[in-house]
C-alpha cells in the first residue's frame, strides 16, 4: 500500500529545494531573530506573573518563538500542497501508480524535515542572545515536542489545502487561524494571565501544550505536567494528520 | 482486446454542466489520434478521465486493456501524460525531474540512467539536462515533459495541447518529436488541440469535438472530402458559357456554377486540373483573367459541422458570453 520509494522521492525533493533556496531560509529566520532581538532583549528585564523567577523575558520567549516558527512554516508547507497539486510537480505524481497515502507521507516527511531544520537553526541562534540549553537530555525532550508541533500543523495545513479550491483562502487562514493560534498559545506571555474566557480558548489551542512542553524541557517551568502536554500533543498530532490524509485522499480521487 | 483505448458512452457532468456527453470511440494500437475542438469542448476532461484523474459520471472506458474505474493502478502504469500547464518542478534540474519520475515508477538506478539517457536524446536535451528547469525556455520545458511522459515506456501517451503557447518554429519541432515518437517507438498517442494545422499534420484520425460531443470522426483527408473536394474559381472574359458547357461534360468535375464571368467548380486534386482548364479555355477562345484554388482545411470541416469557425470561440471568450456569440452564428 505504501510506496516507500515515493515517500523518499518526495522527501528528497523537499530537501533539495530547501538547500537550494537560500533566500527562503534567510527569510524564514528573519522574523524569529527580530522577535528575539527586539522583543526579547528590549523586554528582558520585565517580569510577568507565571513566568518563573530569574529567567528573563528573552529566555521565556525562546520556546515560544520556536513554536511560532514551527506553527507558521508547517501550516504554510501543508497549504502549499494545494498550489503544487494544481500547477506543479504533484499534479504529475497524482497519475503515478502510487497510493495517495504515500504522497501524504512523503509530503509530511519532507515538510517536517525542512521545518525542523529551521527551528533548530533558530534554537542555535538563540544561544547568541544568551539563551542556555540545559543539557543533551532536555534537548532531546524539546526535539520530541518540536516534531509533534510540526506534524500537528502540517496536518492542519493539509486539511485546509484539501478543503480549499484555490489559494484565495490563504490570507483568511493566515489571519483567522494561524495568528490567533499563535497569540493564544502563550508564546509571548503566560496564559494564566488571560481572562477566564480567553484562557479557555487558549486551552483549545494545540500550540499551548506544545510550547508548554518546550518550556518544561528547556526552562523547567510549565503550566501543565509534562505528561499532560505530551499526551495532548500526541492526540492532536494523530488527529490532524489522519484527518489531513483522509481529506487529501477524498479530494484527490474525486477531482 | 486489441484497441489501445476503448470508450463507451462516456459522460461527465460538473454541477449540471455537461462537459462530456455520451462519447464513444476506439483508438488502435500505435495510432496517433487527435481530439480537435475549441476551448471548453470537453477535450481535457476526456483526457483526465482516461488518465484516471477524474471519475466519469457514467459510461466506461479501457486504456491498454485496463478498466479506468476498477484497474486504476494498471492504467496509470501504462500511460504517460503531458498536461496543458507545465507540471515540472522548476527548482530542480531537468535530470532530477526525470530521475524522480523514474523512481516513482520503481526503476533501479541502472535502469533509470539508461532510460533517462534514451528519453533525453529523443528530445535533444542531453546538454541541458543539468540546468535548473527555471532556466528552460517554453519549448524546452515541453520537450522535457514529453521525455518524462516516456520514461516508464507507456503504451499510451496523452498530450494535452502539446504546443499551446509556443512560437511557430518551436511548434514545428515539437510536431517532429511527436511524429518520430509515434513512428519509431510505436507509442499510441492521443493529443488534444485547437490548432487545425496541428491535427491535420499529425493525426491519423481526428475527432472533432464541440460542446461535449463528437460531431465528426475520421481521417483528416476523409473529413475534407466530405466537403466535396477542392474549389477552383476562375474569372473569365468571353465565351464563358461555352467553356462551362465543355467542363460540365468532364467526369472529374463534381459540380459547377457559372454566372457573369465567374466560374466555380469543385474537384479533387485541384492543382493538377488547373492546366487542363487553362488549355480548354484556350481551345474555346476564352481568356482566363485569374485563377484561385481553395483546398478545404479542417477549419472548413469544423465550420461545416458546427456552423461556426473554431477561432470565433477563442475570440468570443475574451469579448463576452460565448453563448450569445454562438447563437448569432447559428441563425445565419
Image: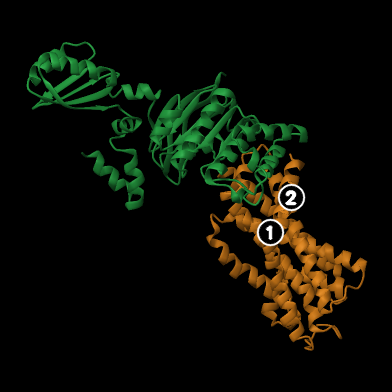
Chain colours: A orange, B green
The dot on residue A21 is 1
- Name which residue lies at 47% across and 43% down: B166
Q: Horizontal and vertical percent for residue A183?
A: 68, 75
Is disc 2 placed on a helix, strand or loop?
helix
Q: Nearer the viewer, mark 1 or mark 2?
A: 1
Percent of width and height locating residue A229: 81, 68
Chain letter, disc 1 residue? A
**Are dots 1 and 2 in contact, CB under 8 Å?**
no
Q: Total number of numbered labels? A: 2
Marked residue nearer the N-terminal end (1 or 2): 2
Between A85 and B292, the residue placed more toward the observer is B292
Which quadrant: the N terminus of chain A?
top right
**Where residue A40 sits: x, y (%)?**
76, 81
Q: Residue at x 67, y 63 (%)?
A: A24
Left or right of residue B19, residue A129 in this image: right
Q: Could you tell whether A42 is left or right of B289 in the image?
A: right
Tag on residue B56?
Answer: none
Above or below for B205 versus B103:
above
Q: CA distance from mark 1 to mark 2?
A: 16 Å
- Quarter of the picture containing the C terminus of chain A is top right
Q: Which residue is mark 2?
A: A11
Amino acid at each position: 500500500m505504501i510506496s516507500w520509494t515515493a515517500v523518499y522521492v518526495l522527501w528528497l525533493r523537499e530537501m533539495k529545494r530547501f538547500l537550494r533556496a537560500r533566500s527562503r531560509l534567510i527569510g524564514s529566520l528573519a522574523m524569529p531573530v527580530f522577535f528575539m532581538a527586539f522583543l526579547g532583549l528590549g523586554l528582558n528585564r520585565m517580569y510577568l506573573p507565571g513566568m518563573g523567577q530569574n529567567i528573563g523575558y528573552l529566555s521565556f520567549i525562546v520556546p515560544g518563538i520556536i513554536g511560532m516558527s514551527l506553527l507558521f512554516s508547517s501550516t504554510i508547507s501543508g497549504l502549499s500542497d494545494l498550489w503544487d497539486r494544481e500547477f506543479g510537480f504533484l499534479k504529475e505524481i497524482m497519475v503515478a501508480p502510487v497510493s495517495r497515502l504515500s504522497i501524504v507521507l512523503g509530503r509530511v516527511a519532507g515538510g517536517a524535515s525542512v521545518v525542523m531544520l529551521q527551528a533548530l537553526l533558530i534554537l542555535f541562534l538563540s544561544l547568541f542572545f544568551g539563551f542556555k540549553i540545559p543539557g543533551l537530555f532536555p534537548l532531546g525532550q524539546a526535539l520530541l515536542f518540536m516534531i509533534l508541533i510540526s506534524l500537528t500543523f502540517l496536518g492542519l495545513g493539509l486539511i485546509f489545502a484539501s478543503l480549499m479550491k484555490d489559494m484565495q483562502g490563504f490570507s483568511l487562514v493566515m489571519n483567522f487561524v494561524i495568528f490567533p493560534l499563535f497569540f493564544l498559545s502563550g508564546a509571548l506571555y503566560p496564559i494564566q494571565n488571560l481572562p477566564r474566557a480567553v484562557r479557555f480558548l487558549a486551552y483549545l489551542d494545540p500550540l499551548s501544550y506544545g510550547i508548554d512542553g518546550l518550556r518544561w524541557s528547556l526552562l523547567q517551568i510549565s503550566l501543565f505536567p509534562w505528561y499532560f502536554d505530551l499526551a495532548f500533543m500526541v492526540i492532536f498530532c494523530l488527529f490532524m494528520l489522519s484527518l489531513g490524509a483522509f481529506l487529501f485522499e477524498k479530494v484527490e480521487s474525486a477531482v | 482486446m486489441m484497441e489501445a483505448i476503448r470508450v463507451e458512452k462516456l459522460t461527465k457532468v460538473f454541477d449540471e454542466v455537461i462537459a462530456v456527453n455520451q462519447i464513444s470511440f476506439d483508438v488502435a494500437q500505435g495510432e496517433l489520434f487527435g481530439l480537435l475542438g475549441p476551448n471548453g469542448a470537453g477535450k481535457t476532461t476526456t483526457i483526465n478521465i482516461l488518465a484516471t484523474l477524474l471519475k466519469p459520471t457514467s459510461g466506461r472506458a479501457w486504456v491498454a486493456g485496463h478498466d479506468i474505474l476498477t484497474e486504476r493502478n494498471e492504467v496509470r502504469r501504462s500511460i504517460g501524460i503531458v498536461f496543458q500547464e507545465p507540471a515540472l518542478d522548476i527548482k530542480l534540474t531537468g535530470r532530477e525531474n526525470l530521475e524522480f519520475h523514474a523512481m516513482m515508477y520503481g526503476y533501479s538506478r541502472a535502469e533509470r540512467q539508461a532510460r533517462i539517457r534514451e528519453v533525453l536524446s529523443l528530445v535533444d536535451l542531453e546538454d541541458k539536462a543539468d540546468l535548473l528547469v527555471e532556466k528552460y525556455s517554453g519549448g524546452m520545458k515541453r520537450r522535457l515533459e514529453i521525455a518524462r511522459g516516456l520514461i516508464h515506456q507507456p503504451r499510451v501517451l496523452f498530450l494535452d495541447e502539446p504546443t499551446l503557447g509556443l512560437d511557430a518554429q518551436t511548434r514545428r519541432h515539437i510536431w517532429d518529436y511527436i511524429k518520430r515518437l509515434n513512428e519509431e517507438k510505436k507509442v499510441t498517442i492521443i493529443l488534444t488541440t485547437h490548432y487545425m494545422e496541428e491535427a491535420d499534420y499529425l493525426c491519423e484520425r481526428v475527432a472533432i469535438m464541440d460542446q461535449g460531443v463528437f460531431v465528426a470522426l475520421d481521417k483528416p483527408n476523409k473529413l475534407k472530402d466530405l466537403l466535396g473536394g477542392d474549389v477552383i474559381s476562375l474569372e473569365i472574359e468571353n465565351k464563358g458559357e461555352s467553356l462551362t458547357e465543355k467542363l460540365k461534360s468532364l467526369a472529374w468535375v463534381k459540380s459547377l456554377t457559372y454566372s457573369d464571368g465567374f466560374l466555380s467548380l469543385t474537384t479533387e486534386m485541384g492543382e493538377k486540373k488547373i492546366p487542363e482548364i487553362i488549355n480548354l479555355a484556350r481551345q474555346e477562345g476564352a481568356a482566363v483573367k485569374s485563377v484561385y484554388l481553395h483546398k478545404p482545411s479542417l477549419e472548413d470541416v469544423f465550420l461545416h459541422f458546427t456552423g461556426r469557425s473554431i477561432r470565433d470561440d477563442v475570440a468570443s471568450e475574451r469579448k463576452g458570453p460565448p453563448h450569445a456569440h454562438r447563437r448569432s452564428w447559428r441563425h445565419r
